[in-house]
Every structure is written in structure tokens, then in C-alpha cells.
Amino acid sequence: MTRPARVVVVGDVITDVVAVLSGPLAIGSDTGAEISLGGGGQAANTAAWVAAQRVDVTLVSAVGDDDAGRVRVAELERAGVDCAVERVEDVPTGTVIVLAVDGERTMVSQRGANLRLSAAHVEQALAAVPEAGHLHLSAYTLLDAGSRGAGLRALAVARERGLTTSVDAASAAPLRRVGARAFLSWVRDVDLLLVNADEATVLAGGLDPAAQGRALSATARRVVVKGGAAGAVWVDRTGTVSVATARRVTVVDVTGAGDAFAAGLLTAWLGGATSTAALDRATELGALAVSSVGARPRS
């Protein structure tokens, strides 16, 4: 494999408040938990994992002009991520409360400054990295009406410049709100679409993963359906179907697992790996992510 050209990741920066619960949430009462605070956001997490693979990466995002935003950017820069950040006054940096229990996680979100990411900032940031070879977009940028223009402009500029493109579908609930038809029109002809099992069901119906991938390959050139403990499936328009089994590890916190998976997949594929090898690297990083608390690679 070769070292990929610079990857540009567009999307969200978040402060994660992660509570790993000791048992089921006791509504209206108390539940014990291990609680930590740190950096999150699908795009920021993916960028951090890409940097950990020693691939040059730029994150294009928006934060509030506040202490949280400054801390989030500083920690990303320490991790090796080049940050092209739009600072938004009078709007807080986004925050997510993550409740993790029994291998699942539930998120309560305040999108904050992420909603203010502008198309003009995205275009300016992309112009500043002429050496970039790939653009990866967190679909949260498309799913939020306030930032949708920025997401669409990112994909358009990438196509104009001849960059390869990928989109992570982000989350099933907002996908349902915008509707499958609209979303698929926004990501038509991207080189790679990543979806988890719930997102695949929203976009392609209740089929088996390979059939979901085949259905979605009418929109994206390559589709990866992530099944968590059930592994992952790669389908492309040439008819290639590759399958990877999940690594068996003790699950501590699944926050950021999909972002680590995406980084492993992208860096391997962009480096010339086969679909099978790219999936294998993706599942390796995903397993590493779920083995510890938090969404970012361990320093």
C-alpha cells in the first residue's frame, strides 16, 4: 500500500459527556456510572483516527468562540489534525451527552455552532489544501438544515477538483426526518457511502446487508454496511461483495467506534488496499475503539 494524499474531513466538533452506566437507566431515579468529558463529533473523531494512521488530515468545522471550542481545537491539533475552524460568536460549541450501557449508546445532542458551518468557509478551507486527494463528509452536516449548504458545497467542490469522496450516513433518526429520497439525492455518485444497520434500513429497507448494499450502490459507487458485532459488508457497482467478521473484544464504550472504523477503511482503501483488506483494517480500529472509554485514539 502507498501513503494516501491528504484527507479533508468536513463536519462536526463536539464536547462528549460520556456516562458508562452500571446498569439499565433508572428513569426518575439514580443510576451509577463512570463519567468522562472529552472531544467528540463524528467528523472530529474520524479526523483524529485518520491522523493516528499517520495520514495528513484537515478538519473543516465550526465551533463557538468559547473555552470549549478552544479546548476541542487544541486537543485535535495535539493529535496531529490540521484544523480549519470557523469560530461562531454567541453560539456555544456543540455538546452531546452519551449514555452507554450493554454495548449500546444513546445520545442527547446540542448541535450548537455546528449548525452554523458555512459554505463559504468550506470553500475557503478546501482552496487552502491543493494537495488533498479525498474528502470525507459527516452526514450530520447534510441532515441539519443550517449546515446543509456547507455539506453540499463540500461535495460539489470535491467533484470539481477531482477528489474522491465518502459520506458517513451519521444517524438513523435524523435520516428518517429528512427522508431517504432527499438524502440519497444529496450523496448521489459519491465514491463511498458508509451506513450502519439502522441507517441502511432507513435508506434501503429491511433487507439483508448485502442486498441493502446492492440497493444503495445505485446511488454510491461503493457501499459499506456496518453491522457492529455482526461484521461488515462491502458492495460496489462491479458486483464485488466482501465480508468481514467483527473482532471479539470486551466492549467498554461504543462511542466513536464507527468513526474509527471509517478512518481504518478510508486510509486502507485510499492507500490501495483491496476491499477485503480495507474492511479488515476498519474492523481492527473499530474493535480498538470499543475497548476503552471515549471516541478518540489513545495517545
Image: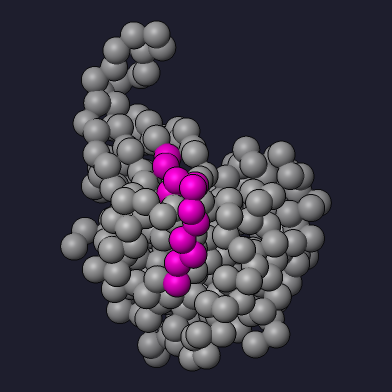
Of the 4 image quadrants, the one containing the N terminus is bottom left
> Looking at the picture, how far across and down is residue 177, in whole percent?
71, 39
| In the foreground, 100 or 143 | 143
Q: Quadrant of residue 100?
A: top left
**Residue projecting furthest to the front:** 90
* Number of disc labels: 0
Q: Is residue 30 above or below residue 265?
A: above
Tell whether 65 sits left or right of 181: left
Closest to the observer, 46 or 3: 46
Q: Is residue 6 visible?
A: yes
- Type of secondary structure dominating the magenta stretch: strand
- Which residue sits at x=74%, y=44%? 178
**Which residue is situated farthest in the top direction here?**
28
Residue that appears at 81% across and 51% down? 181
Q: Is residue 230 left or right of residue 50?
A: right
- Can residue 260 be found in the magenta stretch? no
| Residue interval drawn in magenta | 84-96
Q: Residue at x 29, y 69 (%)?
A: 77
Q: Quadrant of the C terminus?
A: bottom left
The residue depicted at 37 percent of the width and 18 percent of the height is 25
Decide: is 218 above or below 176. below
Is residue 245 among what the camera can see? Answer: no
Residue 139 in percent (x, y) is at 60, 56
Q: Where is residue 48 shown, x and y percent of the image?
A: 34, 65
Residue at the extreme left: 299
Q: Position of residue 56 (x, y in %)?
A: 37, 81
Q: Is residue 29 above or below residue 95?
A: above
